[in-house]
Image (cartoon, rainbow, N blue to C red):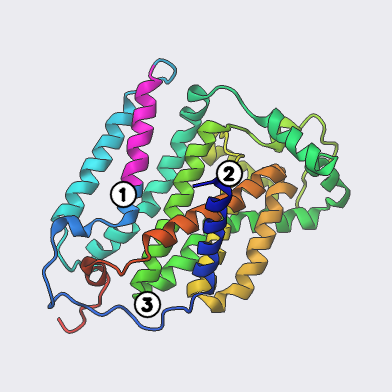
Amino acid sequence: MAPASLCRRAVMTIFGLILAKPEKHRMPAVDAVCPVKPLSRIAASDVITCGYLVIIGVLATVFAERIPQWWWYPVMHAVLVLGLSVFLWKLPPAPRGWMLFVRWWYPAFLIPPIFSELPYLVHPVNPHDMDAQLTAVDFALFGVHPTLWLEAITVPWLTESMQLAYMTFYFLPFVLCVPLYRRRRLLAFRVALCALLLTYYASYLLYFVTPARGPRFYLASLQTLPLTGVWLTAPLQAGLDVLEGVQRDAFPSGHTAIACVVLALAMRYQRRQVPVLLVVVASLVMSTVYLRYHYVIDVIAGGLLAVLCLGVTYCLYREPETRYTALALSTQRSK
């Protein structure tokens, strides 16, 4: 398929996802209708997670000479994949309580350690940082370096507001997914989980292709005005630096991609949240450049990645859910 046709199809699918009528009814429990085979218990989110773990394990093995203690990654990832496979295989047809929670929320516990691996992998695998090229693209688009231009409007209260907006990234997926899970809106929850995981892992893999630290470091010698907040900016930035380590995660902007995915799915499933989310997401996207974490081209790429991942998710979930899908989150209050 030609690139133009592929892009056109992706845009059409994402608009179909956003504009479709939201589901009005909960999925019924069908455990009395038919038994479920173990393989039908595997969701797209499980395949995506295991696929990413396998890819990183293979990368660490291929570039073993460049990565200190390289064996740790394939071994631990193999243990995770094996453990997850056994857990899903042994899972009851209609899990409840903590088993139900772990079955659907385990990715939330995997994302932080998976992300924390990247500083030890990205640069050894691809030691050629792309900051110069990304800076050149921004300059070609705007005739200036956007982060330098924004110094003209840099004031402490705005910096503080932007830093707080930037931090909302860590809560947005839960703002979307928790209400869907609590209300047993299974199809919506699984679509959201699939889209979010696709976006997270796709952005992580792209960091290996275009590693970059961002204008905060690359253009530091050109910046003449420090980003000084009021109370929280300095401790929040210091905390992120400690927790994330030396990341090369500028392109694409994962903050932008995840925020756009959350907003698009809220338009589909949680429309009451949309007015507030529009303000939050717009502020978050602006903060990525204002706070010098990202180039503008990173933000554009993040938006395109969100469209692509949402389009893929929509294609995966065009067909009705499997029988296990209706089982997995059905309430069993009668028992």
Start-end of magenta stretch? 49-64
Residue type at mark 3 is Arg
Q: Name the residue tied to disc 1.
A: 47
Residue 310: x %, y % from top left: 49, 58
Asked whether residue 303 is drawn in magenta, I would say no
Side of 64 relative to 121 (left or right): left
Residue 72: x %, y % from top left: 32, 27
Q: Name the residue tied to disc 3.
A: 183
Note whether 103 is above or below 270 in the view shown: above
Side of 3 relative to 40 (left or right): right
**Which residue shows up at 25% across the image and 72% down it?**
326
In 3D space, how far apart are the residues under numbered discs 2 and 3 (Cα atoms)? 33 Å
The one nearer the camera, 88 or 102, is 88
> Tag 1's secondary structure?
helix
Q: Name the residue tied to disc 2.
A: 240
Note whether 75 is above or below 5 in the view shown: above
Residue type at mark 1 is Val
Residue type at mark 2 is Leu
Side of 178 relative to 158 (left or right): left
In which quadrant of the rendered image does the C terminus lie? bottom left
| Of callouts 2 and 1, the N-terminal one | 1
Residue 30: x %, y % from top left: 19, 77
Residue 241 in view: yes
| Of callouts 2 and 3, the N-terminal one | 3
